Image (cartoon, rainbow, N blue to C red):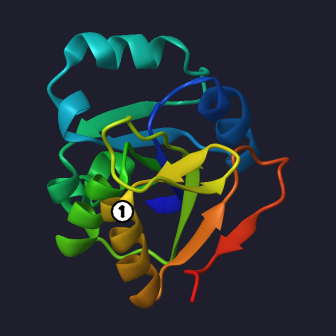
Amino acid sequence: MTLVWTRIDQKLIHGQISLAWVPHLKIDAIVVADTEMKDNPKGQRFMKMGLPPEIKATFFVDPRFITETLEMNELSRRRVLLLFRDMEGLCAAVNSGLSLSKVNLGYHACTPLDPVVTRLGDAFYVCERDMAGLCELYTSGLEIILQTIPSDKAVRWVPAK
């Protein structure tokens, strides 16, 4: 298995993923690490409908068990795109042993109830709790890239001092 790209995108599988990232990265498998979607067969079918034919495998798993999923034989010869809905899922996966060198911040919005919303990029907003998780991941050595689609300039995120 070649983990090609890891991304936080609240919409998970959608047009930017199917039409931009999949062909750009030559992806043939997608793993969605999201507790809510893992238990939502109807939502899974909906997301799979828009996938291009080169996607040969799609998995929906709990972020805490992502390492085991990525080690499956079915993924051994695949180019994998790993998607998380939010910072909480990514942190759960990393705390459960997932080893990453970088993560792409794609799309994330906050609800009106979230405290202290900060805009990091064109389409990525974080609340106070998410910012703490992001800073922790950065401190642990994770490279954090803001980039909505492949044709956008990739911008490395670093915490404000």
Relative to 81, is 43 on the left or the right?
Answer: left
Toward which corner of the image does residue 144 lie, by quadrant?
bottom right
Q: Quick one: SS at disc 1?
A: helix
Q: Residue at x 16, y 56 (%)?
A: 65
Say left or right for 45 vs 141: left
Q: Nearer the viewer, residue 115 or 108?
A: 115
Amino acid type for the residue under numbered disc 1: Glu
Residue 89: x and y in percent read 27, 53
Location of residue 45 (image quadrant): top left
Residue 121, placed above or below residue 23: below
Q: Position of residue 38 (x, y in %)?
A: 20, 32
Residue at 66% in and 31% down: 16
Task: Give the residue pinned by disc 1.
Answer: 128
Q: Quadrant of the C terminus?
A: bottom right
Relative to the observer, which residue lies in front, 95 or 114?
114
Figure check: 62 above or below 55: below
Residue 125: percent from the left, percent from the top?
52, 50
Is 152 rendered above or below residue 144?
above
> Residue 55, percent across and down?
53, 30
Whether residue 97 appears in this view of the structure is no
